[in-house]
């Protein structure tokens, strides 16, 4: 009888051991499967932040032809794009004449990733609380035809006129995770007697994975559709 | 006692049924342990590769302003000190020209050459630390790109302009 009891006890011990090992193995398996996912996401986010910062700096360093329609290679006279924008702003506190050159430059620099990212670029004057230039690029969702062919959605370029910085912050909050580049600059303003003042401003580039923007958020930005880009 | 003794198979034989779950538990534990070890190792290597790609990119782009081929070579020499991963980097022109003019559209990235087919940069802006070339089918291939401003200078007139370019870094093991 004693020998039989010993056999049953050994089997019970083994089953308990199996139960404990199973629990530990399951925990270890889930830990291994999820290990590093957060770090991986952070490394990717770090890359997109680098891209946004590099893009912003490149936009600010770039040159532009003084005569519209010329290319940089053929231009008879070139200037820094930022200098041209400041000169344009100094006339009437608006960015009008250099708007297309700025748009061309931003679109060109963001083109390699424009299929995968939407973006926002703006200048903001701290003292006047004004936005002399706000550009919003969004890409619509792709469409799938009956035969399964996927057509990428068109890209849309808007010029916007938000009233407060909160309107832009609401936009950035509504799109989820985003990467930003920021820089401080100084504009030049001339009064009637040609005395110059140098209002401080912020230039910002924010990019995010295409996400539908809530209608009320878009409405607050007072955007005007400038261009629709159809992918080929 | 007699009945019990009849079914007695010896010290091992008597515990034979209990050895089955015991061995199964040990096999399961060592399988999961190996899986976890490999997962840690593989992910750790992937992080290091991703960080190395960023490090090569950061070294080559510096402050995002490149004063011609000389500056590029200096930064390239610095980047080549990074030995733990193979890399190849090059500059491609971005499309900032008005519609209808040459270079209106971005040409795309050909990782085998990393050179523009249509645009003359006035030098070879290629930096690599190996004689090998990246293969598109490779699973450990990492491609990172960064906009960068490149200065073009006319040596006679000393006039210059700054053009946006795309620095493309391809790394592999």
Image (tube, helix red, strand yellow):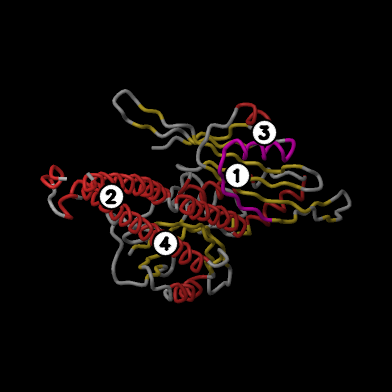
Q: Is residue A220 left or right of residue B128?
A: right
User: Which mark, by number, is residue B169?
Assistant: 4
Q: Are marks 2 and 3 in contact (CB under 8 Å)?
A: no
Question: Between residues B82 and A9, which one lies in front from this camera angle?
Answer: A9
Task: Tell me, yes or no, if residue B9 can be seen here.
Answer: yes
Q: Where is B35 relative to A97, above or below? A: below
Confirm whether circles 1 and 2 share one chain.
no
The range drawn in magenta is: A163-183
Indicate whether residue A128 is drawn in magenta: no
Chain ID at mark 3: A
Give the residue number, with chain letter if any, for mark 2: B25
Farthest residue to the right: give it: A193
Q: Residue at x 71, y 51 (%)?
A: A202
**Whole-Å distance between the Cαs marked 4 and 2?**
47 Å
**Whole-Å distance between the Cαs marked 2 and 3?**
62 Å
- Name which of mark 4 and mark 2 comes first in the sequence: 2
Farthest residue to the left: give it: B6
Chain ID at mark 4: B
Q: Residues within 10 Å of mark 3 (few under 14, many from 20)?
A: many
Give the residue number, with chain letter if any, for mark 3: A221
Give the residue number, with chain letter if any, for mark 1: A100
Report the mark closest to the observer, 4 or 2. 2
Q: Residues within 10 Å of mark 2 (few under 14, many from 20)?
A: many
Q: Residues within 10 Å of mark 1 (few under 14, many from 20)?
A: few
Q: Is residue B93 left or right of residue B30?
A: right
SS for callout 1: helix
Report the mark closest to the observer, 2 or 3. 2
Confirm whether circles 4 and 2 share one chain.
yes
Farthest residue to the top: give it: A146
């Amino acid at each position: 009888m004693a020998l039989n009891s010993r056999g049953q006890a050994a089997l019970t011990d083994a089953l308990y051991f199996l139960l404990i090992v199973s629990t530990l193995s399951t925990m270890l398996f889930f830990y291994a499967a999820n290990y590093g996912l957060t770090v991986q996401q952070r490394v990717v986010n770090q890359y997109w932040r680098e891209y946004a910062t590099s893009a912003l700096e490149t936009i600010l360093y770039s040159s532009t032809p003084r005569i519209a329609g010329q290319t940089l290679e053929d231009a008879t006279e070139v200037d820094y794009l930022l200098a041209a924008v400041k000169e344009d702003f100094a006339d009437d506190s608006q960015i009008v004449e250099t708007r297309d050159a700025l748009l061309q430059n931003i679109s060109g620099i963001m083109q390699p990733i424009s299929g995968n990212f939407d973006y926002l670029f703006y200048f903001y004057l701290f003292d006047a609380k004004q936005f002399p230039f706000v550009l919003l690029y969004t890409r619509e969702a792709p469409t799938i035809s009956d035969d399964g062919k996927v057509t990428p959605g068109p890209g849309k370029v808007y010029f916007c006129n938000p009233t407060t910085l909160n309107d832009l912050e609401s936009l950035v909050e509504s799109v989820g995770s985003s990467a930003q580049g920021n820089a401080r600059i100084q504009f030049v303003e001339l009064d009637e007697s040609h005395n110059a003042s140098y209002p401080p401003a912020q230039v910002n580039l924010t990019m995010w994975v295409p996400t539908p923007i809530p209608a009320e958020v878009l409405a607050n930005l007072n955007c005007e559709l400038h261009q629709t880009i159809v992918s080929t | 006692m007699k009945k019990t003794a009849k079914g007695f198979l010896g010290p091992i034989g008597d515990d034979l049924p209990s050895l089955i779950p015991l061995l199964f538990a040990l096999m399961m534990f060592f399988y999961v342990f190996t899986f976890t070890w490999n997962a840690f190792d593989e992910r750790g290597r992937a992080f290091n590769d991703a960080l190395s790609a960023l490090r090569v990119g950061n070294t080559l782009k510096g402050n995002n302003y490149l004063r011609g081929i000389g500056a590029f070579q200096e930064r390239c020499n610095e980047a080549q000190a990074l030995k733990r991963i193979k890399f190849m980097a090059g500059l491609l022109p971005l499309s900032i020209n008005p519609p209808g003019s040459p270079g209106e559209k971005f040409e795309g990235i050909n990782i085998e050459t990393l050179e523009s087919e249509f645009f003359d940069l006035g030098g070879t802006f290629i930096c690599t630390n190996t004689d090998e070339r990246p293969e598109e089918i490779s699973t450990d291939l990492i491609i990172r790109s960064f906009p960068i401003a490149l200065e073009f200078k006319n040596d006679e007139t000393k006039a210059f302009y700054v053009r946006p370019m795309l620095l493309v870094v391809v790394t592999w093991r």
